[in-house]
Image: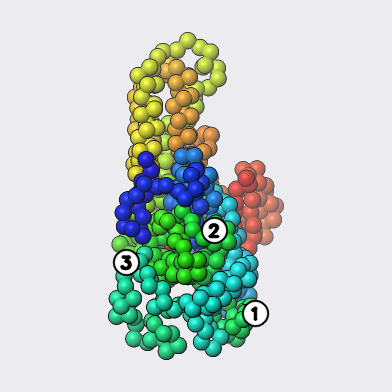
Amino acid sequence: MLKVFNDLTMEREEFVPLEPGKVAMYVCGPTVYDYFHIGNARTFVVFDAIRRYLEYRGFKVTFVQNITDVEDKIIRRAAERGTSPEEVARQYTDAYLEDSAALGIKPADVQPKATEHIAEIIDFIQRLVDRGYAYVVDSDVYFDTSRFTEYGKLSHQSLEDLEAGARVEVDERKRHPADFALWKAKKPGEPGWDSPWGEGRPGWHIECSAMSTKYLGETIDIHAGGADLIFPHHENEIAQSEAASGKPFARYWLHGNLLNVGGQRMGKSLGNFVTVREARRQYDPEVIRFFLLSAHYRSPLNYTPESLESAKGALERLYNAAVTLEHLARPERLAREQGRADEFHARLPKYKDQFTAAMDDDFNTADAISALFDLVRDAHASLGPDAPAGVAAEALALLRELGGVLGLLGRAGGLDDLAEEVQSLIDQRQAARARRDWKESDWIRDELAAKGIILEDTPSGVRWKRKV
Ligand code: AMP
Ligand code: ZN
């Protein structure tokens, strides 16, 4: 039985989707004003693994993730750079898609952008105004939290608590300090769209309500994100959506614990972050993924440079075992007379059960990874040089099957040190270009192309990607 911890009820519950066999899942996506960091990546990787496990369990999952491509931080970044918000959003949307693909994150079934859903957002806000849940002040529209009696049910606090905790500079335009903007009037130099309330742009929260409803319906199965989104983002999404539809918005609310650095959350504003882009220069992205899945998603996970190093060592052990099994299972061995490994063979289903029991226990990826190590340890102890090829092939297939549920161990052969090698070649090429040695620089580019690496010269330096 699959059990999940639901932050709405604060209980472990059996997971039963609304429609048998189908899961409607929405995970809040990035605000595209910069490269995303490995903290953000923890959330994205974790919910990718959860999606994969649901699929492995036979559910047909429809996975929607938004891209927030109009927001204060994007506008500010564009002003700093003397470029347009659209340009900033485009650049970092591309970077997000590229880095998340490198991390083995499956593309969403729908990846809607806020700026492409302005009409739906306006309709949604209009419905809230019509139903008396939103009020207009000049050309701004606010959600009236006092009208939604269940406000606070996800973050488990009352409006009175929130009022008491409100900061001193109370916004006079709001009826209650917890009220939030659904529509923001355009200020000079900002992007804006026509609306019944004047030119402006959507607030952040409303896009998720509008897009989740459009693509998944009024009530969905799973809504997820990092724990920092519980309040106010998800609380506000619930208020808007349930006020508009009169129905429950999401049945299971799942939040991933944040990645910390020295006890503090990794965050852009705190300056303690490592981007996925940077980490990829030093480590294979699968190592980063492995590290992010090494703890249960609701448990704390602390980042230190050594943590990636030890993740690399651990993942290498799994890959080395896969290589050994590949070797034992090679076709020419299949025909030969071999020893027996009946007991090991009989134990294989046990590892599969151990893995699924861990994942059924609120997606415990840490224990699921332990099951992979137990399998590999047993294989190592049980399969000598004369081990039967068929059993080795079965063990390998199981290792790949279970690893694949976590988005790991998908490559034939071992884990390589491509990232380090590529970076060193790029550095050599930059040095060659600096001394105007075009021949050497072209030669290195060709060398990289032969390894399946494509280089891109951008204003912010050379970027590389694997040809896939
Ligand atoms: P943002 O681009 O800031 O909207 O964040 C995108 C996602 O990353 C959200 O689901 C956040 O909850 C999540 N997130 C932000 N910081 C961290 C962190 N340190 N650890 C894990 N997830 C995070
Ligand atoms: Zn959201």
Q: Which residue is mark 3?
A: 156
- Measuring 42% from the left and 56% from the top, which residue is drawn there? 251
Say if 67 sits above or below 464 in the image.
below
Q: Position of residue 254 (x, y in %)?
A: 40, 56
- Helix, strand or loop for disc 2: loop
Q: Around disc 2, counting alpha carbons within 10 Å, would you say few (fewer than 14), some (14 to 19), or many (20 or more)? A: few
- Residue 204 makes an appearance in the image: yes
Question: Do residues under tags 3 and 1 come within 8 Å of each other at their CB atoms?
Answer: no
Q: Position of residue 265 (x, y in %)?
A: 36, 64
State how the image is colored: rainbow
Quadrant in which the N terminus appears? top left
Using the numbered discs, state the Cα–Cα distance from disc 1 to disc 2 in whole angstroms.
26 Å
In the image shown, does 138 or 323 lie closer to the viewer? 138
Q: Furthest residue to the top?
A: 337
Q: Which residue is mark 2?
A: 217
Quadrant in which the C terminus appears? top right
In the image shown, does 5 or 42 lie closer to the viewer? 5
Q: Is mark 3 within 8 Å of ligand 1?
A: no
- Measuring 49% from the left and 39% from the top, which residue is drawn there? 58
Using the numbered discs, state the Cα–Cα distance from disc 3 to disc 1 in whole angstroms.
37 Å
- Helix, strand or loop for disc 1: loop
Quadrant assignment, res 68: bottom right
Say if 170 sits above or below 465 in the image.
below
In the image shown, does 400 or 287 lie closer to the viewer? 400
Q: Which residue is mark 1?
A: 194
- What amino acid type should be assigned to the residue bearing mark 3? His
Using the numbered discs, state the Cα–Cα distance from disc 2 to disc 3 in whole angstroms.
25 Å
- What amino acid type should be assigned to the residue bearing mark 1? Asp
Mark 2 or mark 3: which is in front? 2
Considering only order in the chain, which callout, 3 or 2, is on the residue closer to the N terminus? 3
